[in-house]
């Protein structure tokens, strides 16, 4: 079995051996701290029953750890220069499949079917920060069967995922994450735990998928269109945000009536509304036929 890569010297040796050049465009910052790796594995609660999807294995540092604890590991890596390195660092492990592809183009439901008979999978990653939101939203919105997602993200993004109304970090990502999952901050991680060091602070966050969302809503798609509209122009009132949205077709009168029925001030901003209130607002619009079209529910 190949040397463990959590050790910084082993990471440097393999990078030198292959003359590997870090690519900024792929968000490549490799983990070189075994304590952080241990925390990620523990927080994800990985057992031999689990199939784990790793997004962006890099040179295979976390992949080696995952393979020891999980039943199956499927790792998707976009950078072709890393594939021969992974062949070396992961040789000797018989429960790892490396797929050379862009995670945003992979049929993850298909992977869960193929490798886990459609049962919930766990997702673990030190994410490439430039595509954190599309990856997380894709996992939730494409109905991938998921137990939990334990990921390294930019500290600021971890804050956004956990924040509520009244906080400057509160936004569409907070509401989406909190509708689908329970967020838990596992650890803050400083730049010196990576090679090369990122310019921003990082954090590991675990998102445990709800069996039932915490609020009931008749049309979640409409609720998320309302949420996006409310936050796309943060400093505008909710009323203007909804009226100006290209995704919505309600008249000014219909919007005012719904806001009044919700029982909030007419000049309220979207950032003051809770998830529960967005769900109620969405149900109020469900009953109204849109003037420039009809509401979808
Ligand atoms: N897991 C490794 C570690 O912790 O050391 C590497 C993490 S590094 C922050 C992000 C990894 O994601 C890199 O290996 C990068 O090449 C890969 N990556 C970037 N964009 C990707 C994409 N669209 N699909 C799959 N992998 C991607």
Image (tube, rainbow, N blue to C red):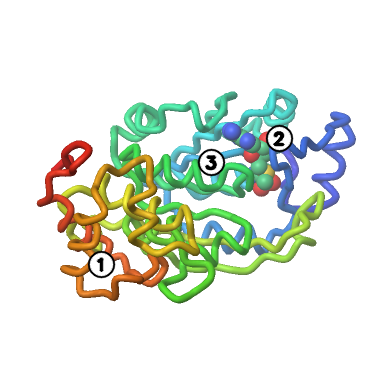
Q: How crowded is the residue under tag 3: few (<14 C-alpha within 10 Å), some, or many (20+)?
A: many
Q: Secondary structure at mark 2?
A: helix
**Label 1, on which residue?**
276
Front-most of residues 54 and 48? 54
Which residue is pictured at 40% across the width and 29% down the height?
111
For the residues marked 1 and 3, what is the alpha-carbon distance in whole angstroms? 33 Å
Q: Which residue is more in the foreground, 90 or 56?
A: 56
Residue 272 lies in quadrant: bottom left
In the rendered structure, the answer to whether residue 128 lies left or right of residue 216 reads: right
Precedes in sequence: disc 1 or disc 3: 3
* Ligand 1 is within 8 Å of the C-beta of the residue at disc 3: yes
Q: Where 185 sits versus 56, above or below?
A: below
**In the image, which is nearer the foreground, mark 1 or mark 2?**
1
Question: Residue tagged by mark 2?
Answer: 89
* Image depth: mark 1 or mark 3 in front: 1
Regarding residue 1, the answer to whether it shows in the image is no
Which residue was labeled with disc 3?
54
Q: Tell me the CA gap for discs 1 and 2.
A: 48 Å
Q: Secondary structure at mark 3?
A: strand
Residue 25 percent across, percent down from the top left: 72, 36
Q: Quadrant of ligand 1?
A: top right
Residue 221 falls in image quadrant: top left
Which sits in the foreground, 193 or 174? 174
Is residue 133 positioned above or below 59 on the image?
Answer: below
Can you tell which of label 2 and label 3 is closer to the viewer? Answer: 3
Q: Where, quadrant-wise, is the C terminus in this rendering?
A: top left
Residue 150: x, y in percent?
Answer: 49, 55
Q: Is residue 16 above or below residue 122?
A: above
Q: Circle 2: is it few (<14), some (14-19), or many (20+) Cα within 10 Å?
A: many
What residue is shown at x 53% (from left), y 71% (from top)?
168
């Amino acid at each position: 079995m190949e040397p463990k890569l959590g050790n910084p010297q082993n990471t440097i040796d393999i990078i030198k051996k292959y003359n590997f050049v870090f690519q900024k465009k792929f968000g490549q910052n490799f983990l070189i701290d075994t304590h952080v790796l241990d925390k990620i594995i523990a927080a994800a609660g990985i057992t031999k029953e689990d199939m784990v999807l790793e997004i962006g294995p890099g040179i295979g540092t976390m992949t080696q750890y995952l393979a020891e604890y999980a039943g199956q590991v499927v790792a998707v890596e976009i950078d072709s220069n890393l594939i021969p390195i992974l062949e070396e660092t992961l040789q000797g492990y018989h429960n790892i499949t490396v797929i050379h592809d862009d995670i945003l183009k992979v049929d993850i439901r298909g992977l869960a079917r193929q490798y886990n008979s459609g049962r919930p999978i766990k997702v673990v990653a030190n994410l490439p920060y430039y595509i954190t939101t599309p990856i997380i939203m894709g996992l939730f919105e494409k109905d991938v069967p998921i137990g939990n997602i334990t990921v390294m993200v930019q500290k600021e993004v971890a804050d956004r995922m956990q924040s509520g109304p009244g906080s400057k970090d509160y936004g569409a990502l907070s509401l989406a994450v909190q509708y689908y999952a329970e967020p838990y901050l596992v650890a803050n991680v400083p730049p010196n735990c990576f090679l090369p060091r990122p310019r921003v602070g990082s954090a590991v966050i675990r998102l445990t998928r709800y069996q039932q969302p915490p609020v009931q809503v008749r049309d979640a798609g409409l609720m998320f269109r309302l949420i996006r509209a409310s936050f796309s122009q943060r400093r505008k009132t909710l009323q203007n945000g909804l009226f100006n949205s290209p995704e919505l077709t309600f008249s000014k009168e219909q919007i005012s009536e719904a806001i009044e029925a919700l029982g909030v001030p007419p000049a309220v901003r979207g950032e003051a509304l809770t998830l529960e209130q967005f769900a109620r607002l969405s149900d109020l619009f469900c009953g109204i036929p849109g003037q420039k079209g009809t509401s979808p529910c």
